[in-house]
Structure formats: structure tokens, C-alpha cells
Amino acid sequence: MKPLNKFYTMLMILGSLTPVSLYVKAQDSTKKDLLVNIGYYNVNNNVAYLGIHARTKTDGKFKPVGGAKVRLYLDKDSAAYLTGDLITDAKGEAYTTLSPSLKDLWNSSATHTFIALSNGDAAFNAARTETPVAKARLQIDTGAGRTISVSVLELKNGSWTPAKSVDIKVAVRRMGGDLAVSDKESYTTDSTGKIDAEFTREGLPGDKKGLLTLVAKVEDNDLYGNLQVEKTVPWGSVLNSENSFNNRSLWAARFKSPIWLLFMAYFIFISVWSVLIYLIYQFRKIKKAGRTV
Amino acid sequence: MENTIIDNKITHDLMPVPFGFWGKIWTGILLLFCGIGAFAYCLQLKNGLAVTSMRDYASWGIYISNFVFFVAISLVGSLITAVLRLANVRWSTPLTRISEIIAVSAIIFASIIIVVDMGRPERFLNLVIHGRLQSPIIWDVVVISTYFFISLLLLYLPLLPDLKLLIQSRGNRSDRLSKVYHFLGSFWKGNPEQVKRSRKSINLLCITIIPVAFSIHTVTSWLFATTYRPGWDSTNFGAYFISGAFLVGAGAVVVAMYVFRKAYHLERYITGLHFDKMGRIVVMLAMLYLYFNINEYLVPAFKMRKPEAAHLMDLFAGEYAPLFWFAIVVGMLLPIAMLMFKRGRRPLPMFIAGIMVVVGAWFKRYLIVTPTLLHPFLPMQDVPASYHHYFPSWQEWAIALGSLAGCLLVITLLVRIFPIVPIQETINEQHETAK
């Protein structure tokens, strides 16, 4: 091959690759950042569970990212510390519990760090998030005069010690959500790690025995994550709900028609058809009168 | 002597006559439409309601529009026969038979088309076995059956004296028609006891048919009004339907009067006076129906509640606007404008106005049924694009047109067999006038 020909060949190869490289670059520039939050949840001081929330910013708004693949680690991002592989749902959420193989590691310390890693894909850049968590628990108790005492205890040096300046919400469970026990939305723990809330929702309907479920919550705390504890108390009014399902009504089953409707319908039906039967009788008379002549 | 000549002349004029050339063509066309409708129905039976354009939202289409139309037309029997007879209005005598024939034919096809809409006709039995008395559908089944029976009696009892004349006119012939006449009326001798019982029975029927006729259309309106939907959520629906039914029924009688008068040369019996009187009735009924329409549309339009707004805007200025304004203008406003004047109440303009009323009324029933179904309170989401619109499939058109043709065929056959104008009553009235 002549040197000139070689030059043209090289130029053609470069020329043909340029759009590809530009396309790849353009692809990179259109990738978005994936924002991953790690949530730590402990309900009624049972085994904790973890949640991740994947979002991205589009047109100035955060939108959930479904189908994002995230690896969750405890303390270190290596295979031995893997808690779970998660894929987010349409709401950009995924949940898991701690892997049993990490039990010893979990018990070895009062504080841990959760690490979420996403390797990125065609649409999103790789992302890494770390969230430190300190082990804590909530205790709820009730006293005279319908007061509710809630304590936050943090694990320090192997013992549970009061945690101060923690915001707590105290509410009562209702069907559509949680209703604050008084007009005060939240409480902050004092130096003893405790708050006292007054239950002012007098006459609130409970269940058949008048039981209500109280709930104390610490939400999205930077150190303790999300903690929640419940207690059932007999402070509600007894609910005597009448089940009208099987009563006679316009919307009931076939043999449960209201009496008034039965009366009206049969009265009208019998009245009209009595006249028609009488007319048939008259018609027979007319026929008979024709034969006897 | 003079009376006998007049009687013979009347009898001769009003006797049913065999189909002529055009009569046969007309019957053939109706049979053709019925045949196409029957074929389309066979396809529907074979493949199910999927052959129609009705889907999850527009689950009632032109079958139900047709049903409401037939029920409406059937009310004419009670209007002309019962109301006018009880009011002692004598001029309506030549129109009573026409009205009753239309009523019976329409109620037969109302029953048929509702079974067509069910998709699985064998399941009609379930209405009887598992029907709930609380459901307006059951009330409709009961009241339609009752109304059919009363209409049949109201057609049959006044026919008895004419059957005697028909039997006499056939002489000793033993053809099929003679056998039918003998089967139906050979016992009628016209003796005083028979006449007395017959009159009493007819009067009782006229009294009974009025509340039943009001019930049939009120209950039909409740099929809609008891369902919470934009356009149907009205306490006025019963009266609205009844006024519309009387209007379309009167319109149908006017059309029939003109056609039979022309085809059977009945100018001596169905006169300009009858058209004039019927014209006045049609104007009154059209105004009444217009009043109810203003009520039904203006009041919700004034409030424009969000779910109603989409439905109303679709009717006033959207997809259904041409049909809506056609039904209002052609079905009500133009007939009122035409028939307000004496010149408009002559036979031909009356015929045109009658056609306009009937056609407008059919589209009005369609507008009552379908647009509402396409505007549910909850938004239509995650459904195929075809679910958002409704246009009947060819099978639906064929069945609907077949049922209309069937109704006209029954009218045509009844008119072929029985006198269109009551002969004996006309003779009696003639004698009374002569006195």
C-alpha cells in the first residue's frame, strides 16, 4: 500500500469513529445524578430494617427513580459486609432487613455506618451514600391523668443511657393516619431523655372495648434514624357500630327488600292485575252472551 | 234506507284491502331490513356483544336508545285512546285504532330490543329467578308486561264489532284471514249485553292504562335517574320522559295518519280537522317537552359543577353538539314554529313536522343514553383509546334498523288485517250526527 493510501485509510477510520465518540460523549452528558437516601427503621424495638429511596432531579423537581440497582453494605463496601442487593420500585423505594451473617458485626458496636452503592447505568451516573446510625430505643408509658411518658435511650458503652434534645411525635393511630394526642405537634426530650405528653382527645372512638393505640415516633433523626413504639390504652369511647349489612334495605340482597317497598309493589301489582283479571272475566261474559243468543 | 247506504259506503271504504304494488314493495323492504337485522343478531349471538362498539364505559348504546324510543312511542295508545276518550273528545275516533296498533307494535319491539341488549337472551330467565324487587329493572319488566297486556286488550275489545263486519264481508270463504276473523270475533253478536259489557270494559281499560302508561315511562326514566351520573342525576326525569314520550307518540300518529290517508284514500275519514287538532296537540306537547329540556340543561349549566361541565360542554359545543342542536331545533323548535300557524297544520306540513319530531326524538334518546356514560365521575384511565368514544358497529345499526323495520312491519300487517279506522264506531257516530 502506498503511503498516501495509508494516510487516507487512517483518515477514514478516524472520520468514521468521530460520530461514535461524539455520540458516546453526548450519552455521558445526558446522564443524570442518582440521589440515594438510606433510612433506618426500628418499630417496637424489634429487629431493625433498612430502606433506600432513589430520586433524581428533573426540571427542578425531585422525582422517584424506579428500577435503580443499589448494593447496601454495613460499615465497609466489600462483599463480606454486603447487606443486600436492592432494586427500587415505581416509588423509588426498596426495603430489606440486616443479613443474618452480619449479626456479630452489628452487635459488636453501638454505632454503624450504612453504605449504599449504585454503579450507574445508561441513564444515571454512579452514586455512593453513607449514613451513620447510633443504636437507640423508645420506651412509652402512661400515668395518671392520661399523661404519656416517652423516653429515648441510646446505647453507649454497653448500657442504655438517656438521649437528650431528640424530637418526638406522640399520636394515636386512626384509620387515615396518626392523630396527635394534643394540639402540640412534637416534643423534645430533656436531659433525662424523657418527654411527657397530655392526652386531650377526649371521646375519641376506640374499638369495641374502647381501646386506642398510642404511638411515639422519632422521624428522620440524623443519628437514630426512624424509631417507633406503640402502646394500647383504654382511653377511647366504646364503639357500638351497628352492622346493617344484612338488614332490609334498597341495596340489600334479593330477599331483604324493605317491608314498605314490598307492600307498595305488591299493592300496585295486585290492584292493576285485579282489574285486568276482572276484564278477562268480563270478556268471558261477553263471549258467553254471544253464544246464548 | 239512507242509513243503510251510508253504512255500506263506510264499511266499504274502511275495509282492509290487500297490498297493492307499493304495499308489496314496502313490505319487501321491511322484510329485507328485518332479515339483515336477524343476520346481524345471529352474529352477535355467536360472537357475543364484542361485535358491538359497546365497551366498559359506553355499555348502553343504540339498543337502549331504541328501547327508550319504543317505550316512548308506545305511550301514544294511552294518549289518543284513553285520555281523549275519557275527556269525551269525539274527533279522535278515527285515530284510536292507529294509536293502539302503533302502541302494541312499539311495546313488542321494546321488549325484543332489551333482550338483544342483554347479549345472552337465555339469561333473561335469571331476572325472574334471581331478580331483586329493589331494582328498577324488575319494575320495568313487570310494568312493560302489564302495559303490553292492557294495550293488546285496548286494541282487541274495540275491534270486536268490526270483526263481525269483517266476518260478514268474507261470506262463506274459508281462507286463512277468514279463520283468523272467526277465531277472534265469531262470538260477537252485538247484542245489548255484549255492547254494555264491552263499553264498560273499554272505559275501565282507559282508566287503568293511564297510570300504567305513566308508570312505564317513569320507571324507564328511573333506570337512568337512580344511577348517579352527570346528566341523569335529576328528580325531574319521570316528567321529562313522559312529556317527550307523548310528543314522539303524537308525532308518530301524525305520520301514520298521513301515510294511511294517502295510501288507503281515507280523506273522508281522516280529515283536515284531524290534522288541525293533532297539530295543536303536537305544539302543546313540543312546548311542554321544550320546557322540561330547558329545566334539564339550563339548571345544571348554570351551576356547571365540574363533573357535569364536561358532559354539558360536549353536548352544547363539543362532539355531540350537532346531534344535540339537531334534536332541539328539528325535534322541537321547528315543529312548534310550523304548527303554530293554521297553514302549518295542513296534512303535508303536518307530515313533515311529524317526521321531524320522530327523527329528532330518536336522536334525543341517543343523547340521553350515551354521552352520559362517556363522562363518568371518575376519570377514564389506563383504557384503550376506543373506550373513550362510541360509534355503533354495523351489527348494531343493522339490529337497530331491523327492529325499527320490524315495528313498522307489525303495523303494516295489522293494518292489512284489521280496519285502520274503527268501522262500527264511525257508523254509530254517523247515525248520532244524523239525529
Image (cartoon, helix red, strand yellow):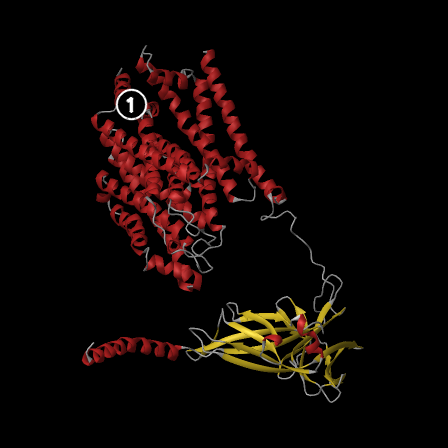
Horizontally, residue B308 falls left or right of residue B363, namely right
Identity of the residue furthest to the top in this view: B172
Residue B406: x, y in percent?
34, 33
Quarter-wise, where is residue A254 in the image?
A: top right
Question: In the rendered image, is residue B78 in sight?
Answer: no
Q: Nearer the viewer, residue B432 or A96?
A: A96
- Report the residue at 41% width, 38% height from top: B116
Residue B301: x, y in percent?
39, 61
Question: In the rendered image, is residue B171 in sight?
Answer: yes
Q: Nearer the viewer, residue A52 or A175?
A: A52
Rendered view: B139 above or below A97:
above
Q: Which quarter of the rendering shows the N terminus of chain B?
A: top left
Rendered view: B69 above or below A293:
below
Horizontally, residue A130 falls left or right of residue B24, namely right
Rendered view: B382 above or below A162:
above
- Report the residue at 49% width, 20% height from top: A284
Quarter-wise, where is residue A43 in the image?
A: bottom right
Q: Chain of mark 1?
A: B
Count of numbered tags: 1
Residue A33: x, y in percent?
46, 79
Identity of the residue furthest to the front in this view: A1
Q: Which quarter of the rendering shows the C terminus of chain B?
A: top left
Q: Residues within 10 Å of mark 1 (few under 14, many from 20)?
A: some
Residue bearing mark 1: B16
Identity of the residue furthest to the bottom in this view: A191
Helix, strand or loop at label 1? It is loop
Residue B341: x, y in percent?
24, 46
Task: Say which amino acid is labelled 1.
Answer: Pro
